[in-house]
Image (cartoon, rainbow, N blue to C red):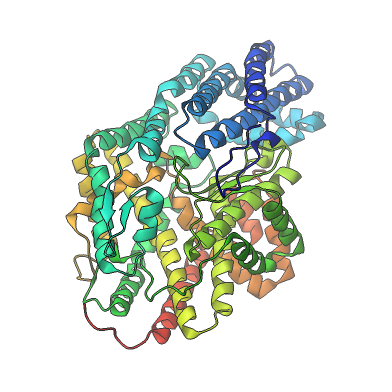
Amino acid sequence: MATVTHPARETWDLSRIYESEERFERAREGLEAALPRIDRWRGRLGEGAATLAAALDEITDAYREFSRLRSYASMLSDLDTRVAAHQGMRQRVDFLGNRISTRFSFVRPEILALDPATVERFLDEEPKLACHAFFLRDLVRQRAHVLSPPEERILAEAGLVLGSAPALYGILNDAELPRPEVELHDGARVRLEPVEFHRHRASQHRGDRQTVFPAYFGAYRAFRDTLGQNVYSVAKAHLFRARTRGYPSCVAAALDRDNVPVDVYRNLIRQVRERLPLLHRYLALRARALGLERIEYPDLYCPLIEAPPTSYGGDEARRLITESLAPLGESYVRELERAFEDRWIDWHPCPGKRSGAYANGWAYDVHPFVLLNFTGNFESVSTLAHEMGHAMHSWFSNRTQPFATADYSIFVAEVASTLNETLLARRMIEIAPSDTDRLYLVASHVDSLRGTLFRQAMFAEFELEIHERTERGEALTGERLDEIYLGLLRDYHGHGAGVAHVADEYAIEWASIPHFYYDFYVYQYATGVTAATALAEGLVRDGDAAVRRYHEFLNAGGSDYPLELLRRAGVDLESSEPYDATFDALEGLLDRLESLMPPDAPRR
């Protein structure tokens, strides 16, 4: 059985995907053996509607099996990244994915050789093509960026080398990076794995915060040049793909997958830049609450007041999340309960386990899986709500959509997850037993907005900057990345205006952010929280009608472009309204925070 056991640890039952590692290997070998049969469709996709439908069905079935293989291997490896055999399984699946891309590289050019009117005629003639309609029409939309069959094959083969930098970073960050050990004010010694760093950066003891921050980031500084070269390699890989496909920029290439205009990305940065005074207002309130003349970078994550003594267990976290998400309707809550009951979640941190948290919905025929590193604090509960948003989105989509249109864009995924966080925060503030608890929770909600909106927009600006420099032919060393990142840190946090002090040593933080390997991923957190805020307001304003629209959004999966799916749900991210709603909500929270704060604390 593939279930991994650990003392006091309830983990996934991966045998629901494959009964054993041996069964996984047989499935992988079977898919590899089946790939050459796809060649019989080469040169035939234009024969007629029935031929095109049969070919696309067979190709989709292959991707469906590959998704199961990828889920199993990646999650088995993530449970303990030190197990070389499981890393090998993951690598074999990655290699198989490259073979699939190469083998199927003829599909896009052959379809695009057809006249668009012929594609539409095929869709009218053959009902079996209905599940492929969005793919076909989207492909026609991108026809200017699809190359000839030999060129597409070369690009597919290039994936063997272009994807190495993220894998190298993952191994270094999760398994091999030497983590420092520090002594805290009470004499306790702590090894600063990412989970421990995230715990102690929130310490109420300022000396501990000032100990763990430089020590943690110092570990990355020791590898600055290597990590800088790795990030530069990723930017160059993105540039290679953009130029070979005829896009004007890396960001245009990345966003075109979802038919998102580049101005949506740039507008996000503009909107957030214009509202930096709201962030600076919060940072000044944070300094006041902590009794500081001005805060320093290590002071950003501790609660404004000592956290309530509550340490949430799994059952309590489950109850709070279920209650908070009741506005999403009975059917949503019923399926959420199923997830908690049926071991979709691996909860607890342990040695070798992948850091962070995620939801995996690739196992289309099973159910989503959620990885956490749950520590019992409120942030962990909020992270669980976030990841269950992803999981439930996949669950509804996979049950409603055929495989061909079940996989939704990350752009809309972050809406579902962030809406859950928003509803949890609102519920917790509402039921807080005292003003002290309410102060803590309001501040936590503001901190979440700070991290999801301002911080992710800063990351997005950094990612755009390094790609534009690469496009101009500039080299990106670790030192240069430090300069760019530190400049943004100081701009966003009001360093020059005396709002917050950001020391030089934190310039290296870029090296600890895995999202910079994800090809313009992070901006979607910020657009996601914007859309989620608008949706939350809609639930209050429109009641059942808003719930119906939201369920239609979840059920739609990837059957349309993300901006269009959101418009149908009631959110237009090409207008200013969702941004206005988000910043108005933030301003209201700041007003409430200020009214709840006690008199100025003694200066430290």
Is 157 left, or right, of 276 in this rendering?
Answer: right
Q: Position of residue 115 (x, y in %)?
A: 65, 25
Q: Quadrant of the N terminus?
A: top right
Q: How many marks?
A: 0
Question: Is residue 249 in view?
Answer: no
Residue at the spot x=33%, y=67% of the render? Answer: 276
Q: Quadrant of residue 103?
A: top right
Which sits in the foreground, 577 or 100?
A: 100
Q: Position of residue 223 (x, y in %)?
A: 24, 38
Which sits in the foreground, 250 or 59?
A: 59
Q: Is residue 386 above or below residue 510?
A: below
Is 444 left, or right, of 70 in this rendering?
Answer: left
Residue furthest to the bottom = 599
Q: Is residue 275 above or below residue 433?
A: above
Q: Position of residue 389 (x, y in %)?
A: 60, 55
Residue at the spot x=45%, y=79% of the render? Answer: 439
Q: Quadrant of the C terminus?
A: bottom left
Which sits in the foreground, 190 or 260?
A: 190
Residue at the spot x=29%, y=66% of the render? Answer: 299
Residue at the spot x=35%, y=54% of the render? Answer: 197
